[in-house]
Image (spheres, rainbow, N blue to C red):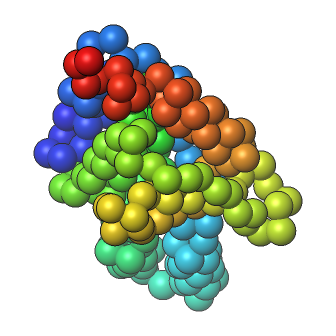
Amino acid sequence: MRIFALETDVNKIKKRFCAEGEEEILLTYYHGLSFLFAIFREIFITMGLGILGAIGWHFDWPMLWTVGIIFLLWFVFVFFNLMKAYIDWAYDFILITTDKVILLDQTSFFKREIKPIHIENIGGVSTKTQYWDIFPFGILCIHLKEGLGGQSITKHYVPRARKVAGILSDVITKYQRHQPTAQEVLPS
């Protein structure tokens, strides 16, 4: 299903960005704690509004007005941030194929960024730990080659980041080994 820029069908994205004969190696979404950490502030605002409602009930405020105002405040200050965090968590993914890495960043109903990075443009992969390596996720860094600016793309909350980096590194190695040499390309 598609709502403005939000595409909920991963297969449509795969079909659009993967060439014929290209095999999917790994598809991973971001860890659920990324959603929880993103809505931490909204949880406290909701609890505060709930406490305000309990205070209003205790002091016999007009409940229709109290609930209406509290709901309006919750909708304005919490709902949109909650939806943004959910969309950002539920529909973002990393897809590794035999030819490329596709990074999908779905920020809202109106904004989506898809970065297909061809394997030949990746100079290396590294991982970092997050939160003292207590949780089963980490930071994945994809280092681009110098000709492309030598930048790094960093993704947080990647489940089993070391495993994902290992798989990506294997794909890069296999890709480089199967590239024809100059002698194979040039006629004798």
User: At 53% across and 36% down in the image, what residue appears?
Assistant: 172
Is 172 drawn above or below residue 47 in the view shown?
above
Is 21 drawn above or below residue 53 in the view shown?
above
> Across the whole image, how many numbered discs are drawn on residues?
0
Residue 119 location, quadrant: top left
| Viewer-nearest residue: 101 or 148 | 148
| Viewer-nearest residue: 184 or 54 | 184
Quick one: which residue is furthest to the left in this view? 4
How far across and how far down the image is residue 155, in percent? 52, 58
How far across and how far down the image is residue 19, in percent? 26, 20
How far across and how far down the image is residue 15, in percent? 26, 21
Quick one: which residue is furthest to the front in this view? 188
User: At 56% across and 77% down in the image, what residue appears?
Assistant: 41
Residue 180 visible, this angle: yes
Side of 154 relative to 138 (left or right) = left
Quick one: which residue is furthest to the bottom in this view? 59
Residue 87 visible, this angle: no
Quadrant, the C terminus? top left
Side of 161 relative to 41 (left or right) = right
User: At 56% across and 59% down in the image, what residue appears?
Assistant: 141
How far across and how far down the image is residue 65, in percent? 35, 77
Quadrant, the N terminus? top left
User: At 45% across and 49% down in the image, what residue appears?
Assistant: 122
Side of 131 relative to 167 (left or right) = right
| Viewer-nearest residue: 114 or 32 | 114
Is 186 drawn above or below residue 76 in the view shown?
above
